[in-house]
Image (tube, rainbow, N blue to C red):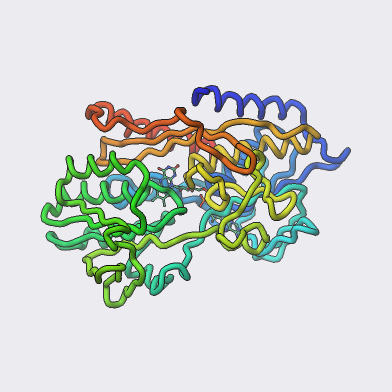
Amino acid sequence: MTRGSTRRQVLAALAALGVAGCAIRRGVKARVVIVGGGFGGASCARALRDADANIDITLVEPNTRYLACPLSNLVIGGWRSLEQQSFSYGALQARGIRVLATRAADVDPVARTVTTATGATLPYDRLVLSPGVSLDFDGLPGYDAAAAKLMPHAWSAGAQTLLLRRQLEAMPDGGTFAIVAPDNPYRCPPGPYERAAVVAYYLSQSKPRSKVLILDAKDRFSKQSLFLSEWRRRYGKQVEWQGRSDGARVVRVDAIAGQVETEFDTVRADVTNVIPPQRAASIAVRAGVADASGWCPVDAATFESTLQRDIHVLGDAAIANAMPKSAFSAQAQGRLTATQILSFFNGLPPVSTKLINTCYSYLAPESAISIADVFAPDGQRWRAVSGAGGVSALDATPEDRRGEADAALRWFDTATVGAFG
Ligand code: FAD
């Protein structure tokens, strides 16, 4: 199975189902409410609308503009602006999707309604939850919203991204920029390591006596050999990674004192970027679709919650097993969920398909690496298809790395048009 044919299959399924039209009850429009206008929710809304003009689609999202996380590390590195990360919901509205700029406050899975923070009650035939993650402030003692103002996470794009950038710019030469990386699972597995490279690039240009220190709660991470090799080759001793076996897991944060405690030591850096543990956003708990792990179990083929009927959960909030919590995955899951909802409305069986994911990571402004995988539903689990994926070559040429940096930008443009265009 090639990447192209997987995508074609999904698109073909959508097109076929779109022709069939929407027929949940004679003369009554089917109602889909989508909570969360990020990569998963917006892509699902767009795919549903493209496939069927007759469904009543409501997207509930409190922000009037979406600030995308992919490429936001480059804002911290100083060669991309936050404005380039910002997208409006105008195009979705122009497509006839009702966009409500409010928060979903509650879900009644029995009455099949969503209540918004403004007090509106939205009935649905199918509900899609793609609310992303909440930072788990209970998961790392000492780290909370107040601490995040001193030691930013920058794990949602916006004010936190700019704060971390300002702290990096203000850091003296000879200083240390510490990144506290969480254990799995969390949003964007390669993200902390891309950030290390991007910050190291800035330091190599502007503060050559400074270093990046990664304090990791785990021993293995995405694209590990590639990152370790490229950090060493490009930035030498400016990047130091310490894993769990080195005692580097951070167990307590004291933001006022400007230090973190690892299992082995107390570390005081000039800038500390704490990426805390995460769980599904709180509306998932309100809706009763999160389990004790804090994440949402779903039927692999349909992304329907295994805990509540008629509710689909996708993107970062869902347990999609081998599929990483990425925008690429969330978009693929959003499109597949649209297909499955159309199947349901048309009395057809769920479509069976594979999904792909590619995650690009920058090493410097014109250099990137990637990891790609194909995933197949296998019972209740998404499994990686053996031999179908791969990572960039360790010994790739600078031109290859530049090609991947260009591909990363093209992917971002295509993905954001697919979600918000
Ligand atoms: P989100 O995109 O977070 O969207 C969730 C939306 O739900 C938000 O807009 C939120 O406001 C809304 N919401 C939450 N609660 C409610 C509620 N109660 N009511 C209404 N709306 C609600 N992925 C990649 O594929 N490639 C990359 O290169 C990449 N780089 C990254 C770099 C960084 C630094 C980070 C942090 C992440 C990166 N990611 C990347 C991961 C990617 O951003 C996420 O996986 C993706 O955004 C998940 O999409 P989602 O729809 O699940 O959640």
Determine which quarter of the picture holds residue 403: top left
Q: Is residue 325 left or right of residue 161?
A: right
Q: Answer whether residue 403 is visible to the viewer in this image.
A: yes
Quadrant of the snapshot with the C terminus: top right
Residue 203, percent from left and from top: 18, 52
Asked whether residue 99 appears in the rendered view, the answer is: no
Give the residue at the far bottom of this rendering. Answer: 257
Q: Nearer the viewer, residue 395 or 338?
A: 395
Q: Nearer the viewer, residue 295 or 116?
A: 295
Quadrant assignment, res 54: top right
Of residues 94 and 121, the one drawn nearer to the viewer in this rendering: 121
Tag count: 0
Extreme-right residue of the structure: 26
Instruction: Give me the residue at 23% from left, 30% from top.
Output: 395
Does residue 141 appear left or right of residue 339 in this picture?
A: left
Residue 72 location, x and y as percent? 37, 49
Seen at 68% across and 46% down, the residue is 304
Q: State the residue at coordinates (55%, 47%).
A: 315
250 w.r.t. 22: above or below: below
Give the quarter of the image for residue 27.
Answer: top right
Tell me what residue is drawn at x 35 percent, y 49 percent: 220
Residue 97 placed where, x, y %?
A: 66, 44
Q: Is residue 102 left or right of residue 133?
A: right
Where does residue 283 sit, x and y in percent of width and height?
Answer: 61, 61
Q: Eyeballing the image, is 388 above or below 204?
A: above
Between residues 361 and 79, which one lies in front from this camera angle?
361
